[in-house]
Amino acid sequence: MRVAVISDIHANLHALEAVLAAIQGTRPDAVWCLGDVVGYGPQPSSCCSLTEQHASIGLVGNHDLSALGELELDDFAPEAAEAARWTAGVLTSSDRAYLEGLEPSAITEHAALYHGSPREPVWEYVLGPEAAIAALEDSPLPLVLVGHTHVAMAISLDETLEGGLAPEGTEIDLGSAARWLLNPGSVGQPRDGDPRAAWLLLDLDRGRAEFKRCDYPIERTQQEIHDAGLPEGLATRLAEGM
Ligand code: ZN
């Protein structure tokens, strides 16, 4: 079984369309989305429809929940809170119904999926070694997929913890360690210094994982952020990948 894994789309339609086109070129058996379909970006409705159409498994993220009014905005940075309020105002009833039907975690035959982490599926950022060890040890399955940080990573645990950032072209042999934690990075708002849209291709029969990036017209999303009256900082950071 081959699976394309996407996460943190953040209402960036042009990034999502570019990633879906690249995914279709690899003809996977399934697409899994690790959450945060909306928030920050200017096209929440189109991103909900496309994700619902393409992802056989979808998780809900903290930005999705806040747009639904199910999370307080106190823990959000001011730009994120402003975007969450804007998003709540433009979601359609079918977007809401889609997002309301999602959970922040899922267990499949092959992998455990979380927006954040096993111990805090909505909120925890798995970036450092302590969080990575906890996530790998708490997971019921040896392959753990997380999103939320917007940083593509591949971390393994055997005797020791190994790995870290997973730039484009990183290929992993999942048989080379007992446990793996993979983060595909973000489709719509990468924060690992590479502004291109990120995704991950898994070949679960061969035990392989490959980190992918694809170009998209960043300036079109920036113009839409501007036209929507969303904070300009959300547009400028897209070009920086931070
Ligand atoms: Zn996110």
Image: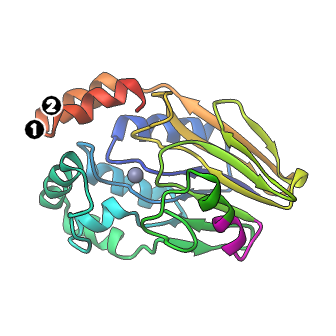
Quadrant including the C terminus: top left
Q: Is residue 80 left or right of residue 163?
A: left
The vertical placement of 194 against 53, above or below, is above
Q: Residue at x 75, y 68 (%)?
A: 110
Q: Residues within 10 Å of mark 2 (few under 14, many from 20)?
A: some
**Residue placed most toward the observer, 165 or 198:** 165
Q: Residues within 10 Å of mark 1 (few under 14, many from 20)?
A: few
Quadrant including the N terminus: bottom right
Q: Residue at x 36, y 24 (%)?
A: 239
The vertical placement of 17 against 10, above or below, is above
Residue 103 in the image: state x and y as whole percent: 45, 75
**Residue placed most toward the observer, 182 or 215:** 182
Q: At label 2, which amino acid type do we have? A: His
Which element is circle 2 on?
A: helix
Residue 147 in the image: state x and y as whole percent: 52, 55
Q: Is residue 128 left or right of residue 172?
A: left
Q: Residue at x 71, y 50 (%)?
A: 155
| Cβ atoms at labels 1 and 2 below 8 Å apart | yes
Q: Is residue 187 left or right of residue 94?
A: right
Residue 179 in the image: state x and y as whole percent: 79, 61
Using the rendered view, name the quadrant where residue 92 is placed.
bottom left
Answer yes or no: is residue 59 visible: yes
Using the rendered view, name the quadrant where residue 170 is placed.
top right
Residue 222 in the image: state x and y as whole percent: 25, 28
Q: Which residues are the magenta region?
A: 134-142
Q: Which mark is residue 226?
A: 2
Cα distance in 3D space between marks 1 and 2: 5 Å
Answer yes or no: is residue 217 visible: no
Specify whether residue 146 is painted magenta.
Answer: no
Q: Which residue is mark 1?
A: 229
